[in-house]
Image (cartoon, rainbow, N blue to C red):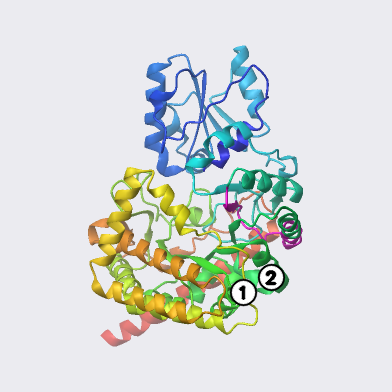
Amino acid sequence: MPVWAYTLASHVPADDRFELQLCDTRFDSLEQIEVVDVALFSGINQDQNSLIHAEAALRQRFPKMVSIIGGPICWSFNQAGDIDKLAAFDHIFIGDGEREITSLLEHISAGRPLEKVISSAKRFNMAEARPVNRALLDSTIDRYYGAVLEVSRGCPFLCEFCDIRILPDNNRPHNKAADLIVAEMDHLCRLGVRQVLFACDNFIGDPRWAEQVLDALIAWQQESGFRPGLYTWLTINLYRHPRLMKKLRQAGFDLLFIGIESFNENSLLETAKVQNSSIKLTEAIREVQSYGFIIVAGLIFGFDSDDETCFDITLNGLRDSALLSGDPSLLTALPGTPLYRRMKLAGRLRQVRYGLGGFKYQTNFKYLMPQDHLINGYRHFIRRYNLGAYQYSRLVAYMDLVGTSKNFVPLHRGGYGEIGRFLTMVLRNRRAVLLLGRRALKFCAHPANIYYALLGLLLVARHYRISGRFSYFQFWLFAWSNSVLKYQDITQDDFDIESVGADFDIHNVMPLDYEESADEPIPTNKTSAQLRATGKQLHALIKRAGLMDARSKQGEV
């Protein structure tokens, strides 16, 4: 669900001057649009070509229309110095649009000129947020699996690769009022919505606010009788808050996306992911999951501190922590981040086009790990990860963890993942039906997969004391078959990546002016903390490389 459109529409004056129409190109044809004076576009970097194509198609039909593009793509392109790649649009808006949208539309309506590039450096105050536009929402909600409700922006942490921290005043939480969140939830549930994603950068960035929201949700559920399944994004330091974990379960949360990133402590230290590196990660994951949560784990390969052992370390970490899922990716230097700046200073950036362009993986900087080692290691990870025996071992570990846990809090209903709702939506869409059929064929092409899937079903059936146990089986099988669909046949040709040359000076992993050139809109003490963490680990990496080189030369002598 394009929550940005519903949100921005709520800040357009509700008078006779403006008539709104939503066109989601995943469902709607541009030809369905009968008239347009102003077209607002949004997307991410990979959407560049489709956005430009859509603007050109509308321009051909409506030559006098005014087109404005905003959203993440504009911020990212501007940080990368590529804003000219969006020149096809009449205006490019960078920043939060809620406060500016009325002024923009009034300028256009009155024929007053606007700058080509319009920036709003100040973050929108989420305490001033309005309910989403009900007319657009009510008329289109049935097309989507559940709903998306934005509840917060910003995150206080300092990961080197993350572009959340570099947005103006975004290195801290900006939160919606709890009563507005409840009111939005009530409206969604009365529309028949039963699954809601709480969109945010980190739901527990402000734990006190998070608890207020949970208390309000629980009270509303008791009063209204609604029990929606909930899913959100947060950080692993949740394990330090047992009261929050209990209330999250009582409120209906069963899926939590957490950026685990790596089980290699050196890689976590390198990227200053202190919330992960300052703890025994497997124990923290097990503690969170002991309440009954499924952690949807983000995984990253390609840190400078990674070596060929990182793939097996991750496989072992997934098993030991009883994670049911783990979606792997390769590290990318997002424009504007400290990682991007470090790679640029070191001369390690690559010129690649935006979008995947036929590759599953196309990344924009040169890795320290040799290209073939990284590709072969990734493919090795996928082969082992998709094996039925390995998948089954993790399901056993998870069910044993939850089945013996004194922390377990049962849900009042099935949770965010609802197979019946999913299949109902799939059957409405021919392309989705074909994709589901392809998933089933690829999964069943290996008889061992069927054997371990049935074994998993029997295992879960035996854990009859665990409330909602079949929802865990359902998620496990879905995540496993999804990985088979996406990665089973991955080949060397699916990668467009590159590594540094043999003549690369290891000292350049920490360029001399990396610290001096740091200039972010966050407190300097926080910038310094990230620089210290990253610098300490990279200097240790340089030292180890020097020792290895010295030993190699001694061996040659």
Figure quadrant of the C terminus: bottom left
Q: Position of residue 163 (x, y in %)?
A: 55, 52
- What residue do we see at 50% from left, 79% from top? 399
Please state which amino acid type lies under the numbered disc 1: Tyr
Above or below for 422 versus 386: above
Above or below for 500 versus 350: below
Q: Are circles 2 and 1 on residues that touch, CB within 8 Å?
A: yes
Q: Is residue 212 magenta?
A: yes
Of labels 2 and 1, earlier in sequence is 2
Q: Helix, strand or loop at disc 1?
A: loop
> In front here: 155 or 486?
486
Above or below for 184 versus 294: above
Q: Is residue 546 visible?
A: no
Give, as a single range, the part of the protein colored magenta: 193-214
- What residue do we see at 37% from left, 45% from top? 355
Checking the image for residue 246, the label placed there is 2
Please state which amino acid type lies under the numbered disc 2: Lys
Quarter of the image holding residue 47? top left
> In front here: 181 or 300?
181
Q: Is residue 156 magenta?
A: no
Residue at numbered disc 1: 291
Q: Is residue 3 visible?
A: yes
Left or right: 11 with respect to 92? right
Q: Label 1: few (<14), some or many (≥20) within 10 Å?
A: many
Q: CA distance from mark 2 to mark 1?
A: 7 Å
